[in-house]
Every structure is written in C-alpha cells, then in structure tokens.
DNA sequence: CGTCAACTGGACTATATTGTCCATATATAC
DNA sequence: GTATATATGGACAATATAGTCCAGTTGACG
C-alpha cells in the first residue's frame, strides 16, 4: 500500500485488473450489439414454437440414437455432451436447439429406450399363452445378453439404477415402463390361467413381478460377474415358480 | 506480422505471451527450489512408505465414512471430492494424502461397504438353519429398506450397477462380495439340507443365487417404484422356491 | 425465385471439479 | 526435549464439461 516498487505480485494484479476491465468493456459492447439486432416486432413472450421440419426431426433422432448408444455403454453420467455431439455428427448448438439441457436429453434417452424395449417385448410376449412360450422368452433374453457377456446390463434397469435418485421425472417414466413390461407378462400369464394352463389361484401380476425381479437381479449379477450364469439361474427359479402353478 | 499498429488482438496476444513466459519462469524456479530442498541422502525410488499413525488412520476412516454415506445417497458420480471434504471435516490435501485420486477413494468406499454388508449379513445368516430363519432374514431386509421407502437401493447393488462398466477393479471386488454373500446363504441352506430340512436334491448354491437375484431385482424395482411391495413379492417368490425343496 | 423462419457450425464463456503445492502444525521416536 | 517424519489447511492451477452466442446456410412456402 503506497509502495512504488514494482513486484511480480503488483504487476500480476495490475494486469488482472486491466484484463478484467477489458473483459467488461467487450461484454458491454456485445450486449449492446445483441440488443440492437433484436427485431422489435417480435413479441418477447412467444414460446419457441418448435415445429420440426423433416431435416430437424432427422437430426434430433440422430442425437437421441447416439445418446442412447453411448449412455448404454458408458453410463449416463460418464457420457458427455461432446461425446454425443461427435457420435451424432452434429454440433453443440444443435443439441441445445433440440434439448434445453442435458437432463432433457437424458429424458429423451429414457423414453426412447423404454419404447425400444417395450416394442421388442410386445413382439415377444403378445402371443404368450403356454409355458413353452415363457421358456422361449427366457432364452431370447439370455441369448441377447450373452452376446455381450452380460456387460451393460438391462437397457432399462441400468437407467433406473442410475437415475432413480437423481431425476424424479425419469424415475417415474421408468417405473411406468416396468409396469407396462410386467403388464405384458401378466397378460400372457392371465391367458394361460384363463385357458386352464395355470391353476385359478395363480396371480398373474405377482408372477409377473417375480419374473421381472428375477430378470433384473439376474442382469445385475451377470453384469457384475461378467458371466450370464446367475441370470440363467435366476430366470429358471422364476420359471420354476410359475411352473408350480401349472395344472396337472 | 510486421505490422506496428497496436490492436486489441495484438495486445491480448502479447499479454498472453508475457503471462505464459512468466508462468514458465515461475515454474522453473519452483522446480529448482523443490530440488534443492530434497535431501540427497533419501533414495529416489523409495515408495511413499505409508505407515499410518493413529491420527492419520482416524482421518482416513472419517473420509471413507463420509464418502460411503454421500455416495449411497447421491451416487458415486454425483459425489464430488469437495462434498467429501466438507462432510468429513478435512481438506483437499488430506484426501490426496490418503488416496492418490478419486478412483482409489471410490475403491475404498466399495471395500468399506462390502465389509459392512457382509458383517451385517454374517450376523443374520451364520446361524441360519431353518425356513423360519430365512423368513426372518427376508423380513429384516424388507424392514430396513422400508425405512427409506426403497430409496437408494442395495448398498452393494447400486455400486455394482454404477461401477461395473467403469472400473474393472471395483467390479471384481463387488463380484467377490456377492459370491461371499451368496456363500453365507448357501452355507445356511446346506446346513438345512444336511439336517434333513431340505431334500437332498436341493442345490444350495443355485438357491442362494436365486435368492440374491430376487433380492437385487426387488431392490431395483422398489427403488424405481418408490414402493417396497415388488421387493416383498420377489423375495416371497424366492422363498417359495426354497420351500418347494422342503421335506415332507 | 425470393424471403424468412428454422437449422447449422463452431468459437466462446462460465462453472464445476479434479488435482497440486507449500508453509505450518502435530505427533512420534530417540 | 529435540529432531524428524508425517499430517494438515487452504490457496492455487489445470482441466473437463455444461451452456451461450451469433454469423452464415439451408430449405419450405408463397
């Protein structure tokens, strides 16, 4: 204070001040420029009015597809927007054009994955009406997971585990998806009960929940062990449980 | 190049160069200073030789305990080192004194959580010898999880899901822990089989894996639905499966 | 075919988080 | 009790990542 000796500290401080002042000046200029460019005729409160052209829709789909892929392999938190940008061959501004922030992109990923899984499972389960059919369902899941030796786990379960305590909206969507998935199983089991394959005291909803839990637990153990055997054992347990309700 | 007009860009460039040069100079000075402070008598290749005094051990334990807590509630990726520092009432340098990086801290968390769960389960399972005992085990887990309405999931399962595809060493530790946990169940089931409670054709290992999968799947569904019912249903299915191997 | 809204690219800023450094304090061993 | 290794605190640097901005391009539609 009051010293006139130029020390390194002094100089650095001075330079910082200069730079900061510059910064402020430049910012002010930019702000003014922006303001002057804004057309006055456009009302400020109008919402963006997103009406996608085919090109925009394609870009959006490409972004979501890349994000679905990356988050499945790396996990949601380990996937950066830059990863997504690169993989989808787009740019930062496109991401923010289609999604207000990362959270919304993640929600789109959740919705897309849920749609994919449910469509697949609808195909596998809508004609389920025999125990043999349930075994085929089990085999298809095991085979699919064996391809990657159990890595990455369930497309929905891994999201659920990562997001459940972090984004309540995503959690709710996932919860609904599980309900719907179990519903597909339950419908098949109900058909089996109504046709006399299962005893009348079989509870389709509870059996479906049991199957889903075995599936999810199996996924997790397989992913951790890098071995699908626990998944097979878990599903076989659940199938045995269903079998115990077979007539005759 | 060759121009003598001082523009803002020029000035900024020059300043950046000056600052960079300074930086380099300061760094060199620091390095030299460090070098001169080093006692020559100490061999360079000696490893840090971490031999904790009681005080250090207490601090380390405090750090791990805080990290265990925070990662359980917020997830591993959402827990910052600054969170851990604040919660453990320590400082950055302490963290890095005890752990080379975040990854190692996470591994310590994994080890600690595994130790905690296994100790608890050892207490719950080491005297397991009847179906009643298995029901008590189930009830204890459900009650414990009901306290938080299913939130956060299993202390090990949630870690497994988050780390399995991200840190192979952590994954391996978790896999071993699951094996040990299942081993506790299997040992109890084997006692039941040997004492004639279970039929000779009961496979303790498979039954244990089934129980564990139902437990983990139940945790996940309960966490997602914010409702422990699916966990109860899943465990009851697994218990029914064990029951189907009871004699008489 | 011209106009304009919508889309695109990428440089840039802001911020959060990890990781480094060193002067000081403390405890353990001699 | 002194010496020395170890632990501590907090300021600091480096980096990674989210998010902003705008000039320029494209394509739909009159």
Image (tube, coloured by chain):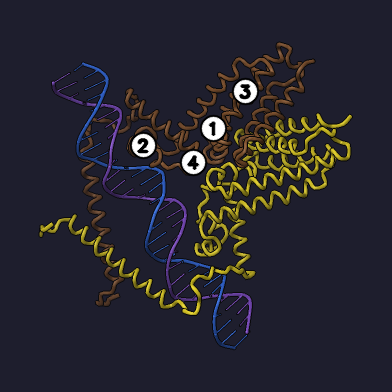
Chain colours: A brown, B yellow, C purple, D blue
Residue wearing tag 3: A137
Question: How many C-alpha atoms fall within 10 Å of the one at disc 3: few (<14), some, or many (≥20)?
Answer: some
Residue pictured at 50% horizontal, 70% vertical: B45
Residue wearing tag 2: A96
Q: Nearer the viewer, mark 2 or mark 4?
A: 4
Query: Do the residues indicated by labels 2 and 4 lie within the same chain of the protein?
Result: yes
Query: Do the residues indicated by labels 3 and 2 lie within the same chain of the protein?
Result: yes
Q: Secondary structure at mark 1?
A: loop
Query: Do the residues indicated by labels 2 and 1 lie within the same chain of the protein?
Result: yes
Picture layout, residue A200 above or below residue B142: above
Query: Do the residues indicated by labels 4 and 3 lie within the same chain of the protein?
Result: yes
Q: Chain of mark 2?
A: A
Q: Position of residue B170 (x, y in %)?
A: 58, 49
Residue wearing tag 4: A74
Q: Secondary structure at mark 2?
A: helix
Residue pictured at 63% horizontal, 47% vertical: B174
Q: Position of residue C11 (x, y in %)?
A: 26, 46
Specify the quadrant of the image occupied by residue C23.
bottom left
> Can residue A53 be seen in this snapshot?
yes
**Separation of marks 4 and 3 at Cα, in angstroms:** 27 Å
Mark 4 or mark 3, earlier in chain: 4
Quadrant in which the C terminus of chain B appears: top right
Relative depth, front residue between B168 and A59: B168
């Amino acid at each position: 204070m009051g010293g006139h000796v130029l020390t390194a500290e002094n100089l650095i401080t001075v330079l910082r001040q200069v730079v900061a002042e510059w910064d402020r000046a430049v910012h002010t200029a930019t702000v003014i420029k922006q303001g002057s460019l804004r057309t006055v005729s456009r009302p400020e409160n109008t919402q963006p009015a997103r009406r996608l052209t085919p090109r925009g829709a394609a870009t959006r789909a490409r972004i979501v597809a890349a994000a679905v892929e990356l988050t499945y392999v790396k996990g949601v938190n380990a996937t950066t927007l830059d990863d997504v940008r690169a993989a989808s061959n787009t740019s930062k501004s496109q991401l923010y054009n289609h999604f207000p922030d990362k959270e919304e992109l993640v929600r789109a990923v959740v919705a897309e994955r849920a749609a994919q899984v449910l469509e697949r499972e609808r195909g596998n389960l809508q004609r389920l009406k025999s125990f043999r059919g349930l075994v085929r369902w089990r085999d298809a899941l095991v085979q699919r997971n064996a391809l990657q030796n159990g890595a990455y786990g369930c497309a929905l379960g891994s999201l659920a585990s990562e997001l459940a305590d972090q984004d309540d909206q995503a959690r709710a969507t996932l919860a609904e998806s599980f309900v719907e998935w179990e519903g597909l199983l339950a419908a098949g089991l109900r058909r089996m009960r109504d046709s006399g394959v299962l005893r009348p005291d079989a509870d389709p909803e509870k059996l479906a929940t049991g199957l889903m839990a075995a599936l999810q637990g199996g996924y997790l153990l397989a992913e951790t062990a890098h071995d699908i055997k626990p998944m097979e054992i878990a599903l076989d347990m659940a199938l045995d449980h269903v079998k115990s309700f077979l007539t005759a």
